[in-house]
Amino acid sequence: MKLYTFRRAPGAADELGVGCAEKPGFLYPLECFGLHFHDMTDLIRTASPEQLAALRTPPAGAEPLPFAALTARAPIPRPAQDVLCLGINYSAHHTEAGRFDKDAFGDRPQAIYFSKRVTEATGDGDPIPRYEGLVDSLDYENELAVILGRDAWQVRAEDAAQYIFGYTILNDVSARNLQTGHKQWYFGKSLDGFTPMGPCIVTADEIAYPPALAVRTTVNGELRQDGNTRQFITDIAHVLAELTQGMTLKAGTVIATGTPAGVGMGMQPPCFLERGDTVICEIEGIGTLTNTVG
């Protein structure tokens, strides 16, 4: 099942919808099912199994909306907590990052965790801000994002799949000069507009666990990233088990799992994003997330 957040017109209220498998490119607003949730996080936290199951069968006579006529939103426009991220979680990306800045991206004996402040996540089709004068090395990172469906505390690795509500695509947009210059990653990852997410959430039952999904990114039509989530250094089960030893992760938490090789800083010479560049992040089974630098 694919779940969307959308607006019927620019500036209208956010609504939730369900993708229509029988009619690709259409979705059913949740109001068709007689259900109402404040937002996607509310749905994740409060929807009963029976309500979620009901969303799989459109009510008789309900008319789906053409998605092309709607304004796409990030599926979770305002995460309740900072997005949790893994750094350097693919070996080939570790190599290219170390080549760019060994001090910032050198050997780390354990998983690298950081958070990304998100005032409002950017939707599919929305621009990525350039920040002239502040950012001189704007970069992309296509990542599988895991969305938790239950509060997680002291999770056993073998039980990790039970805590996953679904998956989406997240572009961990990064200002490399801020990330490396400040010797920490929070500022360079957290500027407004640096968290494109979408186009939807695919529920966990649609994707075999552990996910082994192709991850591809193009910039202006040129293939830059071509990896697979089976290449994780630190897998999802380890992440949940390790973090929840002493940290409660609430339902609705978004965890970005790291990016494969092929980012701009890894090219020789580095090739960063410029105004007008279009980045398309694709993950198998989820779809594509497209954003142009404004």
Image: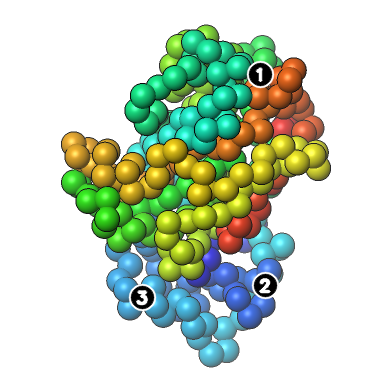
Residue located beneath label 1 in the image: 137
Please tell me whether residue 14 is drawn above or below residue 196 in the rendered image.
Answer: below
Q: Residue at x 71, y 63 (%)?
A: 69
Distance between the alpha carbons at the discs numbered 2 and 3: 22 Å
Residue 79, label in figure: none
Could you tell which of marks 2 and 1 lies nearer the N-terminus? 2
Q: Residues within 10 Å of mark 3 (few under 14, many from 20)?
A: some
* 102 or 29: nearer the viewer: 102
* Number of numbered markers: 3
Could you tell which of marks 2 and 3 lies nearer the N-terminus? 2
Could you say whether the residue bearing mark 3 is in a helix, strand or loop?
Answer: helix
Distance between the alpha carbons at the discs numbered 2 and 1: 38 Å
Q: Residue at x 49, y 10 (%)?
A: 103
Could you say whether the residue bearing mark 1 is in a helix, strand or loop?
Answer: loop
Please tell me whether residue 226 is drawn above or below residue 211 in the rendered image.
Answer: above
User: Which x, y percent locates residue 270?
Assistant: 71, 20
Distance between the alpha carbons at the discs numbered 1 and 3: 45 Å
* 141 or 52: nearer the viewer: 141
Please tell me whether residue 11 is drawn above or below residue 102 in the rendered image.
Answer: below
- Visible in this render: residue 83? no
| Label 1 with label 3: CB-CB less than 8 Å | no
Residue 51, label in figure: 3
User: Which x, y percent locates residue 38?
Assistant: 39, 58
User: Which x, y percent locates residue 133?
Assistant: 66, 12
Residue located beneath label 2 in the image: 24
Q: Amino acid at mark 3?
A: Gln
Q: Residues within 10 Å of mark 2 (few under 14, many from 20)?
A: few
Q: Amino acid at mark 1?
A: Ser
